[in-house]
Image (tube, rainbow, N blue to C red):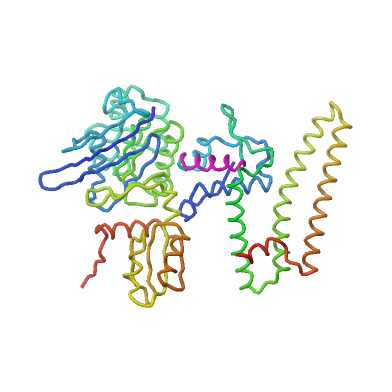
Amino acid sequence: MTVKLECRSVTKRFERVTAIHDLDLSIEAGSVHAIVGPNSAGKSTLLRLVAGLIRPSSGTIQLMEDANQRLPRPGVGIHWVSPEMQTYPAFRVAQVIRYARLLHPAWDTAREQTLVSAFDLPQNTRVGHLSLGMRLKLQLTIAFAARAHLLLLDEATHGLDPVGRDQVLDLVLQESAQRGMTVILATHQLADVERAADTISVLAKGRCVGTWPLDELRESVYEVSALWEAEGEQRASSCPGALMTRPIGERVLSIVYGHQMEIETWFRTQGATQIDVQHAQLTVWLESLLAKEGAGLERIVLS
Amino acid sequence: MWLRVDVHANRPIYQQIIDGIKEQIVRGILQPGQRLLTVRELATTLSLNHNTVAKAYQILERERVITLVRGRGTYVAVTPDAGDLQDIERRTDELREALRMWMVQAHHLQWSDAQMMSLFKQLAGELRVTATATAAETETETETETETESGTETETETETEAEAEAEAEAEAEAEAEAAMSSGVEPQWVKGSDEQ
């Protein structure tokens, strides 16, 4: 079974803040979808909404099995993995797993044993005494052994060492390839996204800035450096698809989304010279996009 | 089946997979008719997103590099067929553009056309060495297999094939040499000048 997600005009207000503002998002069944954005962009709130842990103030969130069929029972097969998740602190690891085994009908004991030994989970330790990384590994063990249909990973690789991080991403990719599990991955580490995700949405200030296939971004974001006679910054910023423009020495650097030839032609016809068009890194793209949305990070200067 | 993929590179991952498979076919690591890993298997082996691998396979199939046999798997295409006309045109343009960039590089290295040609031949030779070595291996295999049935026939066939191949190769070499010594530019250089 594969699960498709459809969010329509979702708004979530807490007492004084609007965490999610009129958000539309559609995630294909069987895809690994990354949600990136700065702190307090609304990533965690969105994942909690999808998990059904909180309800939207307005709008609808629909999880559909395959094409159009609604899920038989809401919440079944959805696993939310987050450092914020509290399991029973007084339970020992083995007890939590035993409890989960009773709770989930599709539980796979062979998988459970593989994961417990691969992650080196200390069976007799109380959950409250586990490190952050171990707590995440316990949650992942439960999600994979329960054969999750939709996996929501909220910064789930952050407490992990690099080897553990690769292990987890590899597991996610295997499950996605072999069982068509849908994955939503909220993170601000683009390194995770680059390997695992096929589509990416950017959240800023509770709004969805856009959704792109990752391969399209790799092909379509360019760093353009050019010489202008006058008002270079202003003129370069009017280029279609321009995300960011700033002067560097006598040249002007632009980050532009589009086709290489079209970008080059546009700059030439506008009178720029010595035009150099190069592919830009994903991090450069994200920084520029967030700056454009007014959610960029200002440089902090200590006096 | 192993491909080197750099997830941090600017080149899209699906493109890296396409290029990797194409190169392995040229080098004879992958043989015509050989079964490829399924999308899921390759995604799992390389620890990549399966949709990305699926996209690479779709494009390879469109370019007739691989053949999808429903219910049976994916195979390296047996018949050499470059795909539909529009696709061939686009890829030819890309190849010409790439060669043009090389010529620019060569100019700045102060290389002569002849030097460029000899490097070109050397690289083609290197690719062919691996390809013929693997091809020879499989040829002897088939020979021993078929000998029990009708040994003489297959032998003569492979001989004529090998002869024809050697002839074609010699011809191509002679042509290239003649082009270089007479100072006539080979066609692919001419094409780039027109642009």
Q: Is residue A105 above or below residue B48?
A: above
Asked whether residue B63 is drawn in magenta, I would say: yes
Q: Is residue A217 left or right of residue A92?
A: right
A284 or B164: nearer the viewer? B164
Residue A2 makes an appearance in the image: yes
Image label count: 0
Q: Is residue A242 above or below residue A96?
A: below
Please tell me which residue lies in front, A198 or A277. Answer: A277
Q: Residue at x 41, y 52 (%)?
A: A217
Residue A278, placed above or below residue A46: below
Which image quarter holds the N terminus of chain A? top left
Where residue A33 appears, as percent x and y from the top left, is 36, 42
- Is residue A146 in view from this perspective? no
Q: Is residue B130 magenta?
A: no
* Residue A249 image offset from top left, x and y in percent: 37, 77
Coordinates of residue A51 in the picture (x, y in percent): 26, 35
Q: How far from the left and from the top, in percent, is residue A167?
A: 42, 42
For image coordinates 46% across by 63% down, the residue present is A278
Q: In terms of image quadrants, where is residue A248?
A: bottom left
Farthest residue to the left: give it: A15
Task: Give the extent of the magenta segment.
Answer: B50-64
Majority SS type along the magenta span: helix
Work out whether residue B32 or residue B104 is closer to the camera in this orientation and state it: B104
Image quadrant holding the C terminus of chain A, namely bottom left
